[in-house]
Amino acid sequence: MSNSVPVPHRDTEEPDFPAAADRSQWRYRPRRAFWRSRLVRAVTVVTLLALCALVILALVREQTGTQGFLVGLGLAVLPVPLLMSAFRWLDRVEPGPWKNMLFAFAWGAFAAALVAILANSFAVHWIATATADPDSADNLGATVIAPVVEESAKAAAILLLFLFRRRDFGGLVDGVVVAGFTATGFAFTENILYLGNAFGEDQEFGSGIGMVTAGTFFVRVVMSPFAHPLFTVLTGIGFGFAALAPPGKRLRRVLLPLAGLLLAMSLHSAWNGSATFGGPLAFYLVYGALMVPAFGLLTWLAVWSRQRELRTISGELPAYAAAGWLAPTEPLALSSMRARQMARAFAARTYGPPAARAVGEYESFATTLAFLRDRARRGTAGPDFPAREQELLHHLWQRRAVASPALTYAARATGRAWAPPQYLDYDGYNPYRS
């Protein structure tokens, strides 16, 4: 054993240690406070959401009764898979982690719903006591208090993911999807309450699931399942624009989410007001003149944002193709969802499921690389851009033997390759064949 001690250079530069090439294998690390542990933070979040779930479900069951709760639960769950699938489809280019989506849904369903039911009840009771006018208190609560409280509570989930999962929050599509999952969770719990109460009213008349339940189901689930997602998506768009803002534009990062939140509150207030004050005619007027056009506009914006992501891929990846990391036709294939799916299918038919998974991983890494380069071009990638770029290129190179021929084949099959590709120029080498 040598007793020599490395001597630092006079310019305080760190000396070269033998094991410095792979510091992830170092045994000793600085102590960290226990609350900084990812496991502790994850357990804390899950525990808080679970407690909120127990409390809010108990409150809803108390208001609706056991039968009403079960009927409301069974009916309220019907639109959830459809809405979640729609938002997940929108996020197909660079899918966000499922843990973020599940957190957003759980926050909306339990935490935001609990805050809303407690705050709304307290505010309406206080106004009714102060004014001695319960009817006015209910109307004011529905049109003013509820939109402010509910949209703020839902926006908290978007803010948390924006602050603590910043790498997964890169633009408009991410804001729309996170907002959509949060609002879907909130609407799920709210629908249990409304449908359960409607069933209770039908029970009083001895009609089982009668006209009140059917009417409530038609209005809330059939006609307007997108109502809460539509409101909250406006907040998500504000955060999406803030994510695209350059690092020095701090005021823009604050004002844009606030503007989105105010728009969400305003649209929510108009929707509630039409049902509270105007009767059926005003409700259908607002539905047709405001909600449907707003839904169409936001749908167009979301689809345009997704197409913009695909254009980012086709615009950023050719630089890596020119450097030899990708085949010339790969950027074209990677910027087409149809070609990407065809490449995975080709790999699965030719080499089996492991190859298809490798192609899917290759597509995911390449997409992340394109967005990382785009953020670097806009000055928002961070100082660790070179290290992250090298890591992604390393992962691409490991999967290139099977993924590149599959993507080249897909580019040719979809007409996106300008010349016949030689997608078997590696002499039939199959890394998955034993």
Image (cartoon, helix red, strand yellow):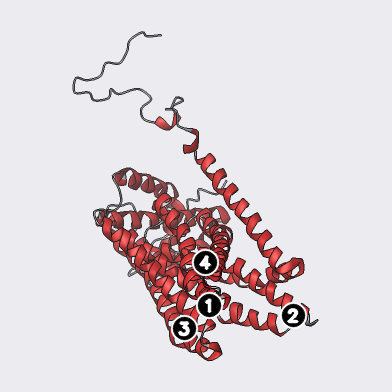
Identify which residue is drawn at 71% across, 63% down: 62
Q: How many residues crowd mark 3 within 10 Å: few (<14), some (14–19), many (20+)?
A: some
Q: Earlier in the sequence, mark 3 or mark 4?
A: 4
- Marks 2 and 4: CB-CB under 8 Å? no
The amino acid pointed to by label 3 is Val
The amino acid pointed to by label 1 is Ser
Q: Earlier in the sequence, mark 2 or mark 1?
A: 1
Viewer-proximal residue among 129 and 244: 129
Position in image of residue 312 (x %, y %)? 32, 64
| Residue on which disc 4 sits | 183
| Residue on which disc 3 sits | 292
| Residue on which disc 2 sits | 202
Identify which residue is drawn at 31% across, 62% down: 255
Marks 2 and 1 sit apart, C-alpha to C-alpha, by 26 Å
Quick one: SS at disc 1? helix
Q: Nearer the viewer, mark 3 or mark 2?
A: 2
| Residue on which disc 1 sits | 136
